[in-house]
Amino acid sequence: MPDVKISRALLSVSDKTGLIELGHALARHGVELVSTGGTSKALREAGLDVRDISDLTGFPEMMDGRVKTLHPKVHGALLAVRDNPEHEAAMEEHGIGAIDLVVVNLYPFAETVARGSSRGEIIENIDIGGPSMVRSAAKNHAHVAIVTDPADYAELIETLAATGGMTSLDFRKRLAARAFSATAAYDAMISQWFAFADQGQTFPDMLAVTAVRREELRYGENPHQKAALYLPAGPHGRGIAQARQIQGKALSYNNYNDADAALELVSEFGGGRPSCVIVKHANPCGVATADSLLQAYREALACDPVSAFGGIVAVNRPLTAADAEAVTAIFTEVVIAPDADEEARAVFARKKNLRLLLTGELPDPKRPGLMLKSIAGGYLVQSRDNGGISIDDLEVVTRRAPDERELSDCLFAWTVAKHVKSNAIVYARDGATAGIGAGQMNRLESARIAAWKAKDAAEKAGWPEPRTVGSAVASDAFFPFADGLLAAVQAGATAVIQPGGSIRDEEVIAAADEAGLAMLFTGMRHFRH
């Protein structure tokens, strides 16, 4: 297919960014400009000659602009196969002039939803004529160029300048692919709004998921795998994908995955006491709350300093130079914080490979949403685990109730256990993790591993006893047997928090009573696979 000379262009855009520059570029190549409504007004005010779409079709814009481009003289001009004699004859008979370029971006549906507009305004911002023109032009890309994004104007202008106002088939094919992606994403966002916001469905019959690639990553979990980061195309909350990287190497797939785990956990503590989370391979290896970030970091590090090497650190308060000095004392891959002062940034700058991510705000741990996981031949979709508990939700099932310190440590350990891979056991004392057992095939082994790590940390630090002595222990699911509970007793735990619900609950409660433990049932499980 030969290059196509652009003689006539149809422009109809809601986003006027770059419009005037593009209009002048087209005019320099002798292109006739046809336009609609506000677009034609903007072009005329810039001194450009513009033909109204109503002049082309012979019909005025009507019904509040709902009907203006849905006309045979528009779509015939876009869909006609130029080297088909029958199409040429039809164009001649009905006075249809060819359109060689369409520049359209669609009504701002997503932006209208995001600003909390009324249902009526949202419906009015569902574009009909725009997608129709885009699809017509994209289908006939053998003869027509279609541009849907102001970011592509520069490439179009450069192409016209280099070719004397021509477009190549390869160029038109690339534009067509982008155009169909744009209309697919647009329709998917509308579908999502109708399903979730308008009709309150949790799992619609058809789940349309759209995302925009932000960057290709160096590789996936392993060097032989490829990876990329995509962002939702429609309205969405902020998270690790929106964090601002201040310094350091590009983030890898594993960095993003681990950083997400760290940010999600530290967000559980919101703007409360200064809190620090250290994550390694998507599991927390140390978590603490304290009177200062520096103290919280030191307490979190003390839980498992071996695993913390090369880990991810997330905090819930802005970082100071003292915090930065402590964090950079060992090799750290990524640091995540709402902000960092200039002195802290200067300290981090000494470690040129360390990635510093500033979030500005923390995600809401109670936010709704869906989680999607691919499996062979399909997808698993579930709602986010945004469940939480309060003191009023707890049931004391042992003869002894926890004292104030034990209760606080139980709630802290339970919060951490929610973010530990199952089977999860978390020991905590005085607002800091004492030992974490993650990802084991049985709960007994998780309890033993967490206790062993605590003992090892105590020996390395020269403490007289492990921090599991006098601790509270959380289990993400019920104890199916008393053996896991007894392992916690051997580690020195004095209080237990768990969902309950096992057919052997009475046996486990009896073992707790015999050991003098206080035990709480939450009635809520937090498996994380």
Image (cartoon, rainbow, N blue to C red):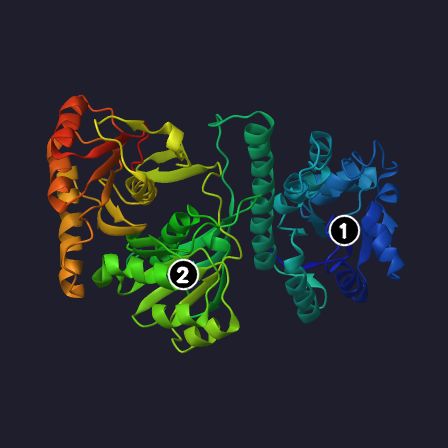
For numbered disc 2, what is the local secondary structure? Answer: helix
Mark 1 surroundings within 10 Å by alpha-carbon count, few (fewer than 14), some (14 through 19), many (20 or more)? many
Residue located at (23% from left, 51% from top): 434
Residue 293 badge: 2
Q: Secondary structure at mark 1?
A: strand
To which residue does mark 1 refer?
A: 11
Q: Which mark is residue 295?
A: none
Q: Is residue 22 left or right of residue 422?
A: right
Judging depth in this view, the residue of 352 and 324 nearest the camera is: 324
Q: What's the residue type where badge 2 is placed?
A: Leu
**Where is the C terminus found, in terms of image quarters?**
top left
Q: Is residue 329 left or right of residue 58?
A: left
**Total tally of numbered discs in the picture:** 2
- The residue that appears at 48% across and 32% down in the rendered structure is 207
Pointer 2 with pointer 1, Cβ within 8 A:
no
Q: Earlier in the sequence, mark 2 or mark 1?
A: 1
Give the amino acid at mark 1.
Leu
Q: Quadrant of residue 482?
A: top left
> Which image quadrant is residue 299 in?
bottom left
- Residue 159 in percent (x, y) is at 65, 66
The x and y percentages for residue 388 are 40, 35
> Does residue 219 sit above or below 413 in this rendering?
below
Residue 520, image x and y in percent? 27, 31
Whether residue 430 appears in this view of the structure is: yes
- Between the residue at mark 2 and the residue at mark 1, the CA separation in whole angstroms equals 55 Å
Is there any visible trace of residue 226 in the rendered image?
no
Picture coordinates of residue 407, whole percent (x, y): 31, 39
Q: Is residue 344 above or below residue 128?
A: below
Residue located at (81% from left, 54% from top): 33
Single out the mark in the foreground, 2 or 1. 2
Q: Residue furthest bottom?
A: 350
Sort mark 2 into few (<14), some (14-19) or many (20+) by Cα contacts within 10 Å.
many
